[in-house]
């Protein structure tokens, strides 16, 4: 399941950032490696929320700087949603 989440998140980041999915790895930093600004970060967050039908709290957004952090957060939120 984690692999699917990662694949979906990479696809979203690719769409927003313009980078190829192959260039985006779990440790890729959105801001340093992909030149994502705050507007694009919000676009990515909104797309992730829609895709996974979850809600990312505003205070969690600055904590997401890498693909892995995004995957971990989405996994946690999906787990909470199930319970």
Image (tube, rainbow, N blue to C red):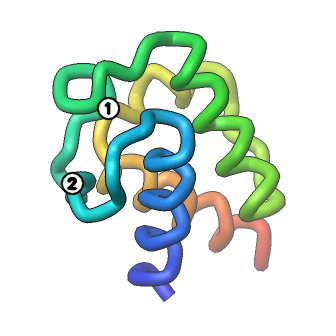
In this image, 79 relative to 67: left or right?
right
Could you tell me which quadrant the C terminus lies in? bottom right
The spot of residue 35 in percent (x, y) is: 30, 20
Please report the residue visible at 73 percent of the width from the left and 37 percent of the height from the top. Answer: 46
Label 2 crowd bin: few (<14), some (14–19), many (20+), radius 10 Å: few
Tag 1's secondary structure?
Answer: helix
In this image, 19 relative to 43: left or right?
left
Q: Relative to 18, is 12 above or below?
A: below
The residue singled out by tag 2 in the image is 23
The spot of residue 75 in percent (x, y) is: 53, 67
**Foreground of the two, 42 or 1:** 42
Q: Cα distance, mark 1 to mark 2?
A: 12 Å
The residue singled out by tag 1 in the image is 30
**Foreground of the two, 60 or 22:** 22
Q: Relative to 80, is 67 above or below?
A: above
Mark 1 touches mark 2? (CB < 8 Å): no
Please report the residue visible at 47 percent of the width from the left and 46 percent of the height from the top. Answer: 13
The spot of residue 37 in percent (x, y) is: 44, 12
Tag 2's secondary structure?
Answer: helix
**Foreground of the two, 67 or 22:** 22
Q: Residue furthest top?
A: 38
């Amino acid at each position: 399941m984690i692999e699917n989440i990662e694949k979906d998140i990479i696809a979203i980041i690719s769409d927003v950032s313009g980078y190829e999915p192959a260039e985006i790895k779990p440790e890729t930093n959105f801001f340093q490696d992909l030149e994502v600004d705050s507007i694009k970060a919000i676009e990515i967050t909104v797309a992730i929320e829609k895709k996974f039908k979850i809600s990312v709290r505003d205070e969690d957004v600055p904590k997401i700087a890498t693909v892995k952090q995004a995957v971990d957060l989405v996994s946690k939120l999906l787990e909470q949603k199930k319970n």
